[in-house]
Image (cartoon, grey):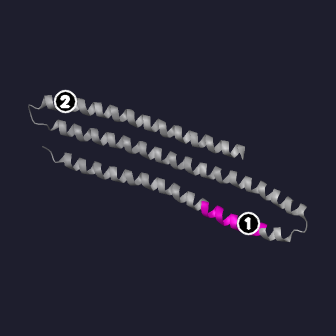
Amino acid sequence: MSTVAPEQFIAAQKARAAALYSLFESGFKGFEKLVQLNVEATRASLAENQAVATEAVSVKSPEAFFTLQSRQAQAWNEKLQAYWRHVNEIMSETSSEILATGEKQVDEYVRQSQALFENLFRNAPAGSEAFVSLWRTGFGAARDAGNATYENAKSAAKQAVEVIDKAGKTVSAKA
């Protein structure tokens, strides 16, 4: 038996670990963007609230106070819409990046797995043709089932992104 198979197996395991951490990194980048957006929104909100409070204590008539409230409600509504647009953009960008990375890694995993098993089958001892044939059939069925599952998951993820996108647009339109 060849020593290439264990080396290929180790390389495939390293590649899968790297792929997993690549997905984690993509998700974390999206999380960082959301945190940064929230920090900026909070900072801006505090400054604006201070300005409004200062202006509110300076008004001299009830009409001016209600005008200030009305103006601030309109500004708050616009800022809320902009905030949710940013959240939607970050989520869409992050999910697209994760989907692309995942698809690339699944394709690479399938390619490496096929190469590993082909090498194992090629180096099988004489007289094990029936066993190799059984394994090929089994791995082919597993590959097909895995591809079908992956395609279903990919379709579901894309639908989820579309629903989130649509919901974000609906919230923006209603607000």
Q: Nearer the viewer, residue 123 or 145?
A: 145
Q: Amino acid at mark 1?
A: Asn
SS state under label 2? helix
Does 5 appear above or below 131?
Answer: below
Residue 146 relative to residue 155: left or right: left
Q: Find the magenta span and give its range.
A: 38-52
Q: Residue at x 47, y 47 (%)?
A: 98
Residue pointed to by mark 2: 134
Q: Residue at x 62, y 40 (%)?
A: 166
Image label count: 2
Residue 149 relative to residue 156: left or right: left
SS state under label 1? helix
Q: Residue at x 27, y 50 (%)?
A: 11
Q: Which mark is residue 49?
A: 1
Find residue 50 and report its image quarter: bottom right
Label 2 Cα neighbours within 10 Å, binned few <14 / some 14-19 / many ≥20:
few
Label 1 Cα neighbours within 10 Å, binned few <14 / some 14-19 / many ≥20:
few
